[in-house]
Image (spheres, rainbow, N blue to C red):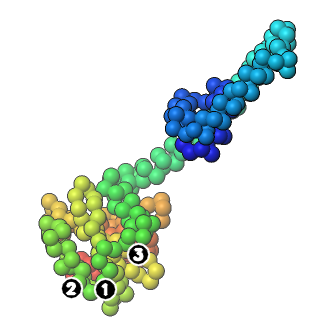
Amino acid sequence: MDCTEVQRLLHAYLDAELDMADTLEVEQHLQECKACLQSYNNYQEIRTAIKTSSLYFQAPEKLRNNIRSSVRKANRNVFLAHVTSWRGLSVAAVLICAILLSLWGVTRLWPTASGGNRLAQEVLDSHIRSLMANHLVDVPSSDQHTVKPWFNGKLDFSPPVVDLKAQGFPLVGGRLDYLDNQPVAALVYKRREHIINLFIWPSTQNIGGVTETNTPQGYHLIHWTKAGLTYWAASDLSLNELQQFVQLIQAST
């Protein structure tokens, strides 16, 4: 605490209006600063002179009692006003919470209603997060021979990387992601201005049927397994175009 701050707080310190922390800091400063200590002593002398001179006026007991009563009444009115206000806010808060919980229930129930599961929600969350966090790719490249070797040593499997530029789905790059409690490969493709995230990681199944999921947010998810790998494609593309992309991936792997 410097001299400017101490000078500003001296009157409150003299009237014992500071909290414990500020009081200790002011006292420590006064022990080290002769100029501020002199100011403090001057204020003390003025206070003493006023109290011991004819200028000091002791308020009558009746006046002091009236002031105390007025203060208590004002405090009670303020308290009642706060209580009334909080009651209104409490009702509003309950209504807002009910609305939010109902919305949360609608968005969280969609995987079960469409035959998906928790993993479908994880995939969708990762897709949306990649679009919002400005971290779409770790290795930006349209060359499959650059993207595929980048995963070496970062994953315990080698994800297939397919070049689909000629078919209208150019490769943008790849990144590491985390799904189903494990690191996974995320290959990023584009279709015009639409982004496609293709998530790949090892599966206990060798081959599985294609599962399509439509989400309330307007995204489409397509899931399948093949050759010991599980695939999830996520995009806001039309379902027909995303199906076309999946068929091209399946044919190339």
Residue 36 at x, y percent in the picture: 61, 38
Tell me which numbered mark, 3 or 2, is placed earlier along the sequence. Answer: 2
Disc 1 vs disc 2: Cβ atoms closer than 8 Å? no
Which numbered tag is attached to residue 195? 3
**Amino acid residing under circle 3:** Ile
The vertical placement of 237 against 69, above or below, is below
Within 10 Å of disc 2 (Cα), the crowding (few <14, some 14-19, many 20+) is few
In front of the other: 196 or 56: 56
Image quarter in which the N terminus is found: top right
| Tag nearer the camera, 3 or 2 | 2
Residue 179 at x, y percent in the picture: 28, 59
Q: Which residue is mark 2?
A: 145
Say what secondary structure mark 1 lies in: loop
Say what secondary structure mark 2 lies in: helix
Q: Which residue is mark 1?
A: 142
In front of the other: 54 or 221: 54
The vertical placement of 150 against 30, above or below, is below
**Amino acid residing under circle 2:** His
